[in-house]
Image (spheres, rainbow, N blue to C red):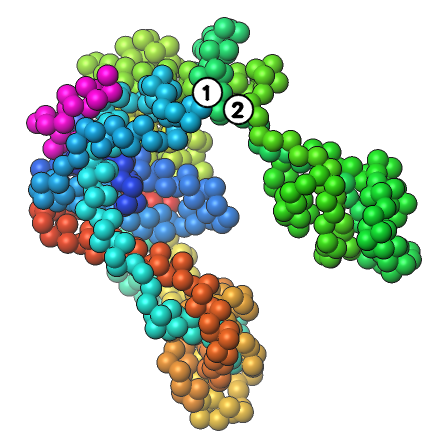
Amino acid sequence: MLSDKLRDGANSKAFKTLLALIIVSFVLTGVGGYLIPRLNTDPVTVGDYKISANEWTNQYNRQANQLHRIPNGSDLLENPEYVASLKKQVLERMIDNVAFNAAVWDMDVRIGDEQVRDVIRRSPAFQKDGRFNNELYLASVRNMGMSPDYYGEQLRVSLMTEAVARPVITASTIPLPFELDNVARIISQSRTVDLYTVDAADIEKGITASDEEAKAFYDANHNRFMAPATVRFNYLLLSVNDLRKEVEVTDEKLEEYFNMYSEDFTLPEQRRAAHIVIRKGSKDYDKRLAAVEKGIKDGKSFAELAKKYSDDKATASKGGDMGLFSRGEMAANLDAAVFAMTTAGQVSDRIDDETGAHFVSLTEIVEPHAPELAAVKDKVRDAYITAQARDLYNQRVTTMSDLSFENPDSLDVTAEALKLEIKNSGLLDQGDTKAAWPLDNAAVQGLAFNEEVYNSGVNSQVISIDDDNSIVINVTEHHDAALRNFDEVKADAVAMVKKDKLNVAINKALEKVAMAVTKDENAALPENVTARKGVVLSPSVDAVGPEFNQAVYALPVDTQKAWVIASNNGTETLGVLRKVSEPSAEDLKTYAEVMNVPYAQYLNMTVQNSLNRQARTLNDIVYNDEAINLVTRTAEQE
């Protein structure tokens, strides 16, 4: 029985250990469980619990994968300083979770079996036809790579932390009216500035750097002139994608899988609509538009109107019929209009956009429904293969870890058992982002350049590169980073010195301009200074780079003396504040209403951070700087 399985572990000695290992928090940021590495590279110890470098790296990879899915996220990951900062943020969140869970346990907060069972039974993920389905529950938990016991304990811990944090957060995250007014005033305010830039090329002409200056810079900044460390290693790569080829598929297995997960293949609501468009600039635009509007008003056939007047030649001959489509599959304005209607035969109001005037008629509604297996067989096959490959992957990761540990001198035994090819990295530079995957991966390089790994001569621990790939390595050759000879990097040193001098000169020139124009707005400017006056900035206008915009909004509201020098899309720019425009009372009220939800989210985050800080004070936290540097150093050198 489910309750029996949950009760077995409720009071076990291992439960307290699980508090630090299980991070499935409904309230906090949710940075996963922990695996203890065999090598002593734990970056942080929180009380009795150790956070491993392996799991830290895995959690960073999950965060990086999420960034890859958002606009410009991949660009952020190209910045080594951002990557190093992100890794440290991930580690701090992991510390927060361990510390908070430990504090909750010490408060004697406990969650009973009945509460855990109730949450499981009420979870939509485990329901079929509106009722809890035990087979679905067991299958879903198995697909997560967990046992019912382990999942129940994870849930128990997350409910414990929620029981403590939720009441505090709920009571503290209701925005007060005066707070919303102040925030709304800032974000609805516009600021007018005069912008000044200096011709860097003109200033650069007079900048020189002697050999002595270059040598002095070289001596003071050896870290900028290092030849990277290098390593060579053998490795085994286990991939979900490769395991898909081993999955045996039969019609019986597909039918069983489809019946168990039929809700995953439910077809969403679809709608059929007809469309009329009168394009801007087309012949007799006004006349045809009026005819369509009158025809619709008079109740004439939409299909006939489309055939006669629509400029959409692809659908006009079919009476404007666009076929069946699901929500989000057509232009946003037309999609919204079609799905706002409730009855077949309805016609939308006129929709104007840059193309012209549109009218849509809802002709059919197909409710969500579970299809027959034959209709979605290819989709079911792909899902089945993916699930089975994932099960194989989870099993073989364990085998890979066990065998590579039990046979530490080489990867031969592990490779033979798992039928994997032993690959060689070749000589790899630390921080080489152009190496072939997975050698370019920061986690792999962090493992390869781990001092204990390359000095031990034995197999490393198995680490996850991402959700679908794991690797184990055996280092055969390593060379430390070495300082390049000055003569080899002299040209680089000279260029760096000149660049530093140029930045100083540009800032001095802009400071002189600032002194002059804050006294006299029309003061004469040097020939190499360019001005853009009267530029209006606001949080929603991208007239300047975001960092520069923030710098301007950080200025005190003093239109006589306030100025700032900051980077504007890579160019040092002087901004002189000339005018601050406040919103009207009506606009201020609207902004306050709009800001209610995001400000509440901000307060939520602030309270969570406060709880985390308090939990940290209740635990002994010891940082292993050397281990932390092993993980972050690769990112900083990329």
Name the residue rendered at 44%, 17% in the picture.
260
Q: Which mark is residue 265?
A: 2
Mark pair 1, 2: CA separation: 7 Å
Q: Is residue 577 above or below residue 300?
A: below
Q: How packed is label 2: few (under 14 Cα within 10 Å), some, or many (20 or more)?
A: some
Residue drawn 23% across the image and 38% down it: 159
415 and 435: which one is in front?
415
Question: Which image quadrant for residue 324?
Answer: top right
Look at label 1 and name its amino acid.
Tyr
Asked whether residue 375 appears in the rendered view, the answer is yes
Q: Which mark is residue 261?
A: 1
Magenta segment, prevailing SS (helix, strand or loop): helix
User: What percent of the width, then of the height, locates residue 114?
Assistant: 21, 29
The quadrant of the rendering that contains the C terminus is: top left
Q: Is residue 7 magenta?
A: yes
Q: Which residues are magenta?
A: 1-18
Q: Is residue 621 above or below residue 213?
A: above
Q: Nearer the viewer, residue 140 or 289?
A: 289
Residue under the image location 31 percent in, 16 percent down: 395
- Residue plotted at (28% across, 45% down): 27
- The residue lying toward the viewer, choosing from 340 and 638, is 340
Q: In the picture, which quadrant includes the N terminus?
A: top left
Percent of width and height locating residue 133? 37, 20
Left or right: 102 in relation to 247: left
At which x and y percent is residue 477? 28, 27
At mark 1, the secondary structure is: loop
- Whether residue 626 can be seen here: no
The amino acid marked with disc number 2 is Phe
Relative to 605, 533 lies left or right? right
Label 2: state its secondary structure.
helix
